């Protein structure tokens, strides 16, 4: 099955700085890579995703890059704000049908005002 | 975006009782839903796949007789924790894929505390 490794497990940045979270996956057949943000006591929310036919995707301050050859993908948050503080999970999925999600361990991001 | 709801959001029960958690897809039909369990400061652990009209598929190590799953309609799946014990206290989250192309939408979670 798929195995997703995520790092760092914790990340502290000053407000306004950038944050980068990296993930690697094992199954080269995986073709859909979502990122979820989970605030304390809440369910994960999809914040951005990328498919294997795209190398980079950006949505305002959030961007995701994918290197299929190396089997790794990264989340980039620029101009961080205190409300970005949360736990972020990456995932890798073989889409087609209804596939279960294999999550990374999560990264606790703290944005210091 | 698609919305998935869970009810209740939190429940406290006595040891030995059973607790039912509902997961609903509000604006789309979901033939498949997933149930996860999350311990503090840990990632989500998949417990089972709920299939509308058929038996659920459980992950290795998850007791199917303890965690009963029913997916009776295209918008509702229920997880019943039977004979709950303090070690069952956790955050339970459901998810539903909408398109079959990977996107999944998660419920807000249910905090279960067993005394």
Image (spheres, coloured by chain):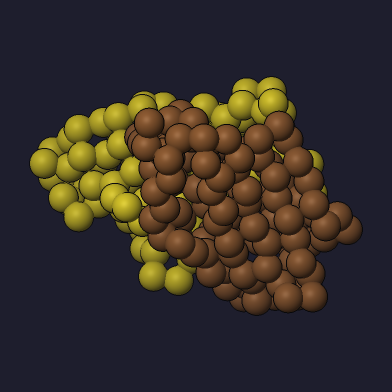
User: Residue A64 location, x and y as percent?
Assistant: 70, 50
Q: In this view, does B74 lie to the left or right of A7?
A: right
Q: Image point 68% across, 61% down: which residue?
A: A73
Tell me if I can see residue A53 in this picture.
Answer: yes
A17 or B50: which is nearer to us? A17
Residue positioned most to the right: A53
A35 or B2: which is nearer to us? A35
Quadrant for the N terminus of chain A in the image: bottom right
Q: Image point 71% across, 32% down: which residue?
A: A60
B15 or A15: which is nearer to us? A15
Whether B25 is drawn above or below A7: the answer is: above
Whether A96 is drawn above or below A49: the answer is: below
Chain A visual colour: brown
Give the quadrant of residue A3.
bottom right
Give the quadrant of residue B109.
top left
Q: Image point 42% across, 53% down: which residue?
A: A11
User: Residue B46 location, x and y as percent?
Assistant: 48, 58
Tell me if I can see residue B71 in this picture.
Answer: no
Chain B visual colour: yellow
Quadrant for the C terminus of chain A in the image: top left
Q: Image point 52% across, 35% down: which residue?
A: A16
User: Residue B100 location, x and y as percent?
Assistant: 78, 48
B63 or B39: which is nearer to us? B39
Q: In this view, does A63 lie to the left or right of A41?
A: right
Number of numbered discs overlaid on the protein picture:
0
Q: In this view, does A10 lie to the left or right of A36?
A: left
User: Residue A31 location, x and y as percent?
Assistant: 78, 61
């Amino acid at each position: 099955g798929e195995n997703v490794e995520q790092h760092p497990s914790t990340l502290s940045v000053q407000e306004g700085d950038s944050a980068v979270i990296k993930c690697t996956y094992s199954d080269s057949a995986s073709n859909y890579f979502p990122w979820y943000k989970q605030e304390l006591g809440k369910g994960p929310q999809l914040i951005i995703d990328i498919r294997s036919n795209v190398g980079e995707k950006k949505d305002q301050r959030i961007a995701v890059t994918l290197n299929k050859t190396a089997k790794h993908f990264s989340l980039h948050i620029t101009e961080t704000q205190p409300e970005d503080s949360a736990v972020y999970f990456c995932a890798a999925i073989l889409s087609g049908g209804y596939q279960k999600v294999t999550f990374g361990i999560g990264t606790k991001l703290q944005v210091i005002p | 975006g698609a919305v998935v709801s869970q009810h209740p959001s939190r429940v406290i029960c006595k040891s030995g009782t059973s607790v039912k958690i509902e997961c609903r897809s509000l604006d789309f039909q979901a033939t498949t839903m997933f149930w996860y369990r999350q311990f503090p400061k840990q990632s989500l652990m998949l417990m089972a796949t709920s299939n509308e009209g058929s038996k659920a598929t459980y992950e290795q190590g998850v007791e199917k007789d303890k965690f009963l799953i029913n997916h009776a309609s295209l918008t509702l799946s229920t997880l019943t924790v039977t004979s709950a014990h303090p070690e069952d206290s956790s955050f339970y989250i459901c998810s539903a894929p909408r398109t079959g192309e990977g996107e999944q939408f998660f419920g807000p979670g249910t905090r279960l505390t067993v005394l």
